[in-house]
Image (cartoon, helix red, strand yellow):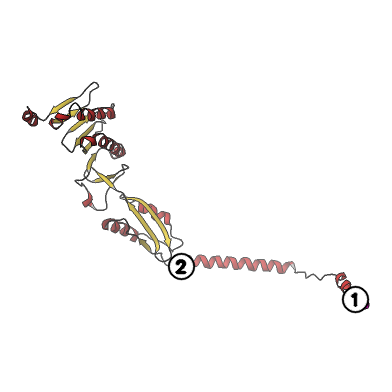
Amino acid sequence: MAQTVNEVTDLMSDKAGRPKSKIQIPATVKYLFMVLVLGLLVLILMMGGKALRDAPPANIYVSNQGLSAAQYRSLQDVMEQQQVSSFFTSDLQALRDITMGLAWVDQVSISRDWQRGIVVNALPKQAVANFGTERLVDAKGAVFVPADSRDLTQERFATLQGEMSQAPVIMQQMQQVNDWYAPLGMQVEDIILSPRMTWLIRFDNGLRVIVDNENTAQKLLNLSQLLGNQLSTRRNEIQSVDLRYKNGFTIAWNVTQSAESE
């Protein structure tokens, strides 16, 4: 038994002592293998690029969510004129810029969808007033031409007039005046800012107010307080008020109503 164990031990010692065989790969073979791998990668990239170039143009899907019929048609007509490439290579930013070029568009989202293609979602500007007779203006003072001309000069809107660059200022002034005069049951119907920065305001009860650009806010606020207190009983008799004075104002009375009151 001891002899058998010794024999096994000798055999294991012989195996451990033998030098390990090592296969030497010639450098030329390694080089050829690397060249082959790189060649395959280049071929794959070339075939992939050709496949992308030869792919059919992507389909553009215009969502009608949040759009009126006229707005949807306007956006659809613009998108149909665009030359797009494949699903993966189409320039989404370029399509977004084109969509934002529509005056009535406020926000745009463009994405890729496996089923529908390139999806275009647009949100329109929300008009809150007329700007002159050919444009509308939103709450931020952005002036735009609506997709449907029938939306122009809506009677439910006040009308703003002035330089287009001054539209945000005019809008802000109208909102402020409406806040001050709302307790009196009065709202701005027309507001004009002249090139000389003179304000002309007409309220829905017929009262007209003219005020210069010096202490404009304070003068309008003071007038609202006077109309609500000292002049409250004669408010309907006032035709117009001129606030272009440093230490006072002038009132033009409605002659017919004033005579009836007397």
Looking at the picture, does residue 245 appear above or below residue 20? Answer: above
Of 85 and 128, nearer the camera is: 128
Q: CA distance from mark 2 to mark 1?
A: 74 Å
Where residue 90 sits, quadrant-wise, is bottom left
* Residue interval drawn in magenta: 2-8
Give how far across and how far down residue 158 sits, in percent: 22, 42
Judging from the image, what secondary structure is the residue with disc 1 in? helix
**Name of the residue lying farthest toward the top:** 247
Give how far across and how far down residue 29 sits, in percent: 71, 69
Judging by the rendered image, the residue that carries numbered circle 2 is: 54
Give how far across and how far down residue 166 sits, in percent: 30, 37
Give how far across and how far down residue 51 sits, in percent: 49, 68
> What amino acid does circle 2 point to?
Asp
Judging from the image, what secondary structure is the residue with disc 2 in? helix
In the rendered image, residue 70 lying in the magenta stretch gets the answer no
Judging by the rendered image, the residue that carries numbered circle 1 is: 5
Crowdedness near tag 1: few (<14), some (14–19) or many (≥20) residues, C-alpha within 10 Å: few
